[in-house]
Image (spheres, rainbow, N blue to C red):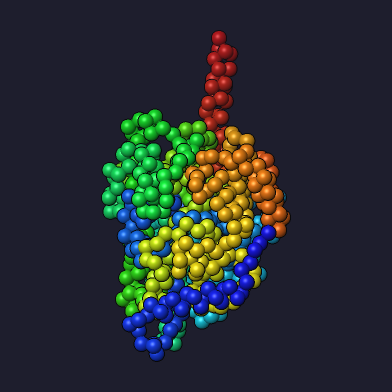
Amino acid sequence: MRVSIKKTNYSIAVALLFGVLSSLAHAAPTTQPTQPPNIVLILADDLGYSDLGSYGSEIDTPNLDGIAAQGMRFANFHTAASCAPTRAMLLTGVDSHVAGVANIIEAIPDYQATSPAYQGALDKNVATISERLRDQGYRTYMSGKWHLGQNPEQLPIKRGFDRAFSLGDTGADNWRQRTYLPIYENANWYEDGQPTELSEDFYSSKTLVDKAIEYIDSATDEDATKPFFTYLAFQAVHIPVQAPAEFRDKYLQTYADGWSALREQRTQGLLDKGILQTSVPSYVAPTTVPWDSLDAQAQAFESKGMAVYAGMVDAMDHHIGRLVAHIESQGKLDNTVFIFLSDNGAEGSLATRQQGDSPAAPAFIMNAWMRASGFNTDIETLGEIDSYHDIGPSWASAAVGPLAWYKFFASEGGMRVPLVIGGKVNGQPVIANSGAVSQSLAWITDIAPTILQLAGAVDLPSDMVGKSLISVLQDERASVRLADEIIGYELGGNKALFQGDYKLVYNRFRGQEPQWQLFNISADPGETQNLASAKPQLFVELKAAYAVWAEQNGVVEVRPDYDQGRVMLGKVFANRPILLAYLVGGLLAVLTLIVIIPWLLFRRFRKRT
């Protein structure tokens, strides 16, 4: 059930955009030539809805806030609740199932892997935004996390990027060339399609910006006249959460009151910044542990861990500032547009410790591997080289303000993220009303057509399901979707369908029977009031619409026993059988120590007596 905007509408939108920009150019000579703008697409990893200063955060993000002050913030922008599906839609403008990346490859069970929608790598028949921009005369560069396929033909250099420094995996250590999960033997970094080694002074946010600058400056004299498209995909703030001490230490006293206090502060911050229009009920995930139930030592550890997280966001913003300053030093800032977003909501997994009712076994296995790999969780050096940290579900729930749940879930906390668009086109602001906030429903596939129109495209590809946001940039009250249009979504058995102010949600959570729920996410973004009984006709209609959408997009339902962690654990042992041998050997050793040896000693004692 897809609704496409006609090409004539796109033409009108483009004409309106550049007409407005031309009318604003009162100081420019009428003979001044125009050139398509440079476009910088910046993607954070696992950044929560309220993690930026311009979205009400206490974290210092002056560079992104500066772009927001002269640009536009989106209050109702959504992505997939996991990284690779978002990245596939971001770079193509088509649904993740059509792009072949309905889930991250590490979490796809065998019975889904036979479907074209669940390959975990970009379908070769789906064009990327970089391929389209290169056809329009752009230089195209990429630095950061790719996670859309690691075969030679799947790497970014084969998907439209002239230069690329990329991480093929779902994540990695931010200080060294080292994997962060036992599923990989090493961190798989590539440059221009070839495996590469990291420099000794590597820190992910710094190095990724260094590469972006290097590539922008690498153009020949002939190519230097062409506009550039730079895709900068940070590791911040994906686990392991790591940050230089000078950024972390600014926040050592900030989080002493705990996650419940932070959630209240962030919710008020969203209200103060105009992201939320009115006070709304807040959802507290059942995975949130009462702060007062922790002893002083645990509270100190958790508050410092959140300081590391804040420092990692702060460091990312600092290095974004370096990139902006460099573009300005080249005299190109007056014709550069910046687009910043997160790939999903805050990460709530517990990789290294047990909290509340979460299962201890995965943490035990992870800890054993982590220690063997040289990581530690020492509070004194938390976030620094060799440290391994994740903020866990309680902080993650606070990082999304009043929203429900976090990464992986189809609730707003997993899918609603910040989107900031700002900058200039030929010296004039790309936003008609600087500092504006749009409440219009927007979706991750909207970014690709927006970029193409900014680059001067008139006719957009018919296969793109996203809608250009150009009309919203010129009037924050505008909407790019009709009232009855839908957006469907499925990832790992969690499902959603958007229509106007309403959202149909289906989440799978251990210990709870999954069921469809209906929310008005305009009045109740925290998804606290299920309207399924109050609006039975709408509830039935949206469920039927989801079924049609799922059929059209090749959704393969997960089985009732599907568990992402278990699938990933199985792939650990399938990909690295040596680890299974170590595990079995370790269990036998433990069994020998606690059962067999005492039994033999007991038998010997009985014989003597």
Q: Nearer the viewer, residue 177 or 203?
A: 203
Q: Position of residue 394 (x, y in %)?
A: 44, 40
* Residue under the point 39% across and 54% down: 274
In the current view of this chain or complex, which residue is farthest to the top? 609
Residue at x-position 27% and y-position 50%: 250
> Which of the image's four quarters has the C terminus?
top right
- Where's the N terminus, which quadrant? bottom right
Place of residue 166 in the rendered image (x, y in percent of width and height, measured from the top left): 49, 65
In this view of the protein, which residue sits in the foreground, 317 or 363? 317
Q: From the viewer's perspective, is 376 left or right of 452?
A: left
Q: Taking the image as drawn, is residue 119 in sight?
A: no
Q: Residue at x 61, y 65 (%)?
A: 465
Q: Is residue 249 left or right of residue 289?
A: left
Who's the residue at 33% across and 47% down the image? 307
Task: Locate residue 353, reporting x and y percent.
Answer: 45, 38
Q: Nearer the viewer, residue 472 or 496?
A: 472
Residue 419 % position (x, y): 45, 60
